[in-house]
Image: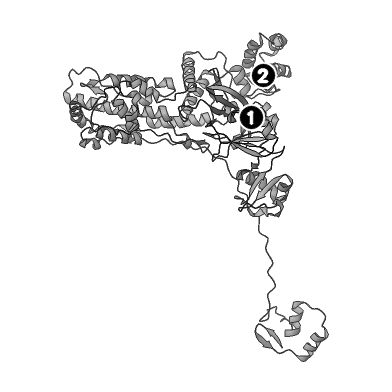
Amino acid sequence: MISFRKRTVMVPLSVAALLALGLPQASAQGLFDVLFGGVPRNGQKLKGEFPPPPQAKKKAPAPITRISSPTYNKYKADSLVSVDFKALAGASQAAPAPTDSPAAQNAAFQPAEEKTDTAPENDAFRQALDGLADYELLAERDIAKALTTYYVAHPSFLWVSDAAVNANASEALKVLGEAGTYGLNPLDYTVDVPPAEVVGVDATERQKQLIRFEMALSARVLRYVRDAQNGRIDPNRISAYYDFPAKPLDLQGVLNTLAHTHEVRTYLESRHPQNPEYQALRVELEALEASAENEIVVDPKLLLKPGETSTELPKLLTLIGRDLADEAGGDYSEVLLKFGASDTYVPELVPVIEAAQKKAGLKPDGVVGPRTVAALAGNSKADRLAKVQYALEELRWLPSDLGSTRVFINQPAFTASYIEGGEEKLKTRAVIGRVTNQTSFFYDEIEQVDYNPYWGVPQSIIVNEMLPRLRSDPGYLDRSGYEVTNAQGKRVPSSAIDWSQYGSKVPFSVRQAPSEANALGELKILFPNKHAIYMHDTPQKSFFQRDNRALSHGCVRLQDPRGMAAAVLGTSVDYVADKLKKGHSSEKVTRKIPVYVAYFTAWPDKSGKIEYFADVYDRDARLKEAIAATESVRLPAT
């Protein structure tokens, strides 16, 4: 008897005898044929038959979903709201500003004898409130709220005395009218001023004029202060490439300070950035507005290679001829005389262009591009004006005091500088992110220097660049000196992983061990941030010889990393070299050193002269759109 599925089956003796004598090995189906008399001819399975073991299906590879870089958004400016003057109907007796408010603590603008809200002024203000009944004043939401909150607590005029516009108001109006000297639009701060003469105007109408002027001027002063301190736009709305913390601003405190000082101009101007770079840009703006347009203007986006044709070429050759006249002109005067009016970039002109490029400090490759045009022909007046105005706006996103000791990376200039005591001690060439992997615009604080560093490969590079190859060659990371670890931190051979099952989020970390081939070179300088951007060395030294150095995945590569490391550590290059000989290690930066990963197409050099750079990421164009969107809200077409 054979036990089968807990049933007892009687086996014929002859079969049992065959089994005992050693029946030749048969298939499972053959055994069923012997035991149960074969399979019916119609192909139906016998009751109780074992199904064949399931065949494992090979999973289809997961589709690779690329990790994309940040995008640029259509800028949306805050809409304006009507100021709710109904809240002022029950304005209470004047209440002093809290003693712990920023305004109350702003001693620089507090005269010895503070002005107080006197009863007669309160009475005049309350009597004029009816003039706001049908008055519509549009303002930004936070300004509208601050306006009513302040005047409920302080029902008194700031800008009116004895039924007339007072001296503080006149000074404030002058400052608002000069907004253009800071690269702002004076129309954003326009206020209708009531006439000084009151002949023929009854008291009620005069009160209406004055109360409306009071509210309008306060609203526009608050807008001016906010724009001066924080900028007209919120850069973080343009793209995730921008990353700036909010700058706190006590709008009620601003009005309280203005109510208790006669230094109105000084206070309002103090809201702008207080650094030499901002002042140098203002000086340049004034000089540009007073200057004439360039006599010869060359298309700043010109791209011309030997053999190609452009009507811009003769303009450029004219400028080159003037510039080379005092030095190399004798060598090329005959060529310029013969081909100076040609629209075709003939081979004879290539040495002329190369000589001009070399003199301008550019790579003499003979290709006429935007950087060559900018260096040889300069920018048009309109272009320079715009770049300076954009730079003034961008400086308002940064701290007013940049710090006497700092690192400043200017992406369009492809440079990184170390400034100490306000003086530039080191300036080195830099490589920044490609247009498809742009370097962000933000600021942080330097924390650490890593010698002979490991390179932790970003997830975007693992997915976008490594994963496609790993599917066909899973062991290439092992062969190339990379270490792979799982979520628990355990080392895993790259060749042991089925990379085809991952398409977007790879649950492994990959890092490259220190070596001459390491992507970070011999050291990196860290300022931890969510963008995973830092400064570092690179084995690709040839990149520093290029004029356009937007070539990395987003981090900033330095031509002189040892010099920068020594500078931030406050030590010598020899010390850094000695540390590098000892293998992998890290060293904390003990001083507070801010680092600005910035983007300015106009920026002063160490002498204060403004230099202009190409807009490598087209961010000036994005800023122009954002400013236009803001102005369209503030000054809607009627």
Q: Which of 63 and 265 is in front in this view?
A: 265
Which residue appears at 24% of the width and 37% of the height?
Answer: 86
Element on which disc 2 rests: helix
Q: Do the residues labelled 2 and 1 touch (CB within 8 Å)?
A: no
Which residue appears at 69% of the width and 85% of the height?
Answer: 3
Label 1 sits on residue: 549
Distance from Cα at disc 2 to Cα at disc 1: 17 Å
Label 2 sits on residue: 357
Q: Residues within 10 Å of mark 2 (few under 14, many from 20)?
A: many
Is 251 left, or right, of 414 in this rendering? Answer: left
Q: How crowded is mark 1: few (under 14 residues within 10 Å), some or many (20 or more)?
A: many
Q: Residue furthest bottom?
A: 13
Q: Which amino acid does label 1 sit on?
A: Arg
Q: Tell which tag, 2 or 1, sits nearer the viewer.
A: 1
Q: Which amino acid does label 2 sit on?
A: Gln
Which labelled disc corresponds to residue 271? none
Could you say which quadrant of the image residue 583 lies in?
Answer: top right
First along the sequence among labels 2 and 1? 2
Question: How far across and down, in percent of the image, does residue 169 sit?
Answer: 29, 21
Q: Which of 55 and 398 is in front in this view?
A: 398
Question: How far across and down, in percent of the image, does residue 241 sit?
Answer: 53, 36
Is residue 279 in view from this perspective?
Answer: yes
Q: Which of 155 and 615 is in front in this view?
A: 155
Q: In which quarter of the image is the C terminus?
A: top left
